[in-house]
Amino acid sequence: MSTPKPDCRAVVADIAIDIELAAMRAHEAVNGDRPYSMSSPQFKIAGIALDIAARAREIRDFIASTYPPPPEPPKGDQR
């Protein structure tokens, strides 16, 4: 019989949030001062940073979708 592995979803979701925030900081650093006069390499890096942030958001959203919905509140506690 194999030992069940611990649930690592929360850890991976936390890492995905860190990746998303770092990618958005990188995008701001490249795009912050003069967004309309970026060089071609800056424009490419800004796009890649946004792609990384979007992928991290996808991972986080997918992990969130794997959790069961929260239980309904008891009838007496509804306001």
Image (cartoon, rainbow, N blue to C red):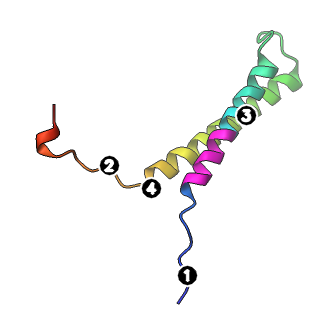
Residue hosting label 2:
70
Q: Amino acid type of disc 4? A: Thr
State the CA–CA distance, disc 3 to disc 4: 25 Å
Residue 30, magenta (yes or no): no
State the CA–CA distance, disc 2 to disc 1: 28 Å
Residue 9 vs residue 76, the one in the foreground: 76
The residue positioned 78% from the left and 28% from the top of the image is: 26
Of badges 4 and 2, nearer the viewer stands 2
**Mark sitting earlier along the chain (2/1):** 1
Q: Quadrant of the C terminus?
A: top left
x then y, percent, for residue 65? 44, 50
The residue positioned 27% from the left and 50% from the top of the image is: 71
Does dot 1 land on a helix, a strand or a loop?
loop
Residue hosting label 3:
22
Does dot 4 land on a helix, a strand or a loop?
loop
Q: Residues within 10 Å of mark 4 (few under 14, many from 20)?
A: few
Answer with left or right where residue 65 lies relative to residue 78. Answer: right
**Mark sitting earlier along the chain (1/4):** 1
Of badges 1 and 3, nearer the viewer stands 1
Q: Residues within 10 Å of mark 3 (few under 14, many from 20)?
A: some
Is 4 drawn above or below residue 9 in the view shown?
A: below
State the CA–CA distance, disc 4 to disc 2: 12 Å
| Residue at the limit of the structure toward the bottom, as seen here | 1
For residue 3, which numbered disc appears in the image?
1
Disc 1 and disc 4 in contact, CB within 8 angstroms: no
The residue positioned 61% from the left and 53% from the top of the image is: 12
**Mark sitting earlier along the chain (1/3):** 1
The residue positioned 88% from the left and 26% from the top of the image is: 41
